[in-house]
Image (spheres, rainbow, N blue to C red):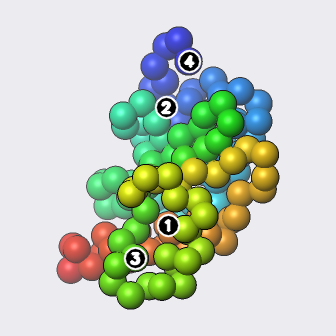
Amino acid sequence: MADKPRTVDEYVAALAPDAREVVAHLREVVHATVPGLGERISYGIPTFTLDDHYLVYLAGWAHHVSLYPVPDTDDGDDELARRVARYRDGKGTLRFSLAEPVPDDVVRDVVLALAAERRDAVG
């Protein structure tokens, strides 16, 4: 991407076809999971917002897509921790290879957990 995208649509359009398809699909999954989310570009990548605060970031790369951050699973959510373990790429990142289908159910559960964390923090 030569020019920095100003919108999520511009970001998605500038991706290579394989990454574009997956990012566009995950964008739909995120919005369907928590209706009413906003979106904008932050740190050069799509950012989904809840009550005007970031909730989750999504980025497309040559061989994978990434979702940031990962919800805190230290609070006893062993099932979610187990399910995200194979996709973890560092402490706060999930990395999904373009060579295999992205597990929509994992993405949905991550987004739901992040939304719950955000709502709990706000009170």
Report how far apart the C-alphas of labels 3 and 1 lie in the structure: 13 Å
> Callout 3, which amino acid?
Thr
Residue at image location 68% in from the left, 36% down from the top? 63
Which x, y percent locates residue 81? 49, 76
Task: Please rate how many residues cluster around mark 1, counting C-alpha atoms within 10 Å: few if below 14, some from 14 to 19, many from 20.
Answer: many
Report how far apart the C-alphas of labels 4 and 2 lie in the structure: 13 Å
User: Quick check: 14 above or below 111?
Assistant: above
Which x, y percent locates residue 90? 43, 52
User: Quick check: 86 above or below 41?
Assistant: below
Q: Quadrant of the N terminus?
A: top right
Report how far apart the C-alphas of labels 2 and 1 lie in the structure: 21 Å
Q: Is disc 4 in contact with disc 2, using a CB cutoff of under 8 Å?
A: no
User: Quick check: 24 above or below 61?
Assistant: below
Q: Which mark is residue 1?
A: 4
Compare marks 3 and 1 and give the one earlier in the sequence: 3
In the image, which is nearer the foreground, mark 4 or mark 3? 3
Element at badge 2? loop
Compare marks 2 and 3 and give the one earlier in the sequence: 2
Name the one closer to the observer, 90 or 3.
90
| 98 lies left or right of 78 | right
Q: Is residue 18 visible?
A: yes
In the image, which is nearer the foreground, mark 3 or mark 1? 3
Report how far apart the C-alphas of labels 2 and 3 lie in the structure: 31 Å
- Which quadrant of the view contains residue 15? top right
In the image, which is nearer the foreground, mark 2 or mark 1? 1
Element at badge 1? helix
Residue wearing tag 2: 7
Q: Is disc 1 in contact with disc 4, using a CB cutoff of under 8 Å?
A: no
Residue wearing tag 1: 111
- Residue extending furthest toward the top: 2
Compare marks 4 and 3 and give the one earlier in the sequence: 4
Q: Which mark is residue 73?
A: 3
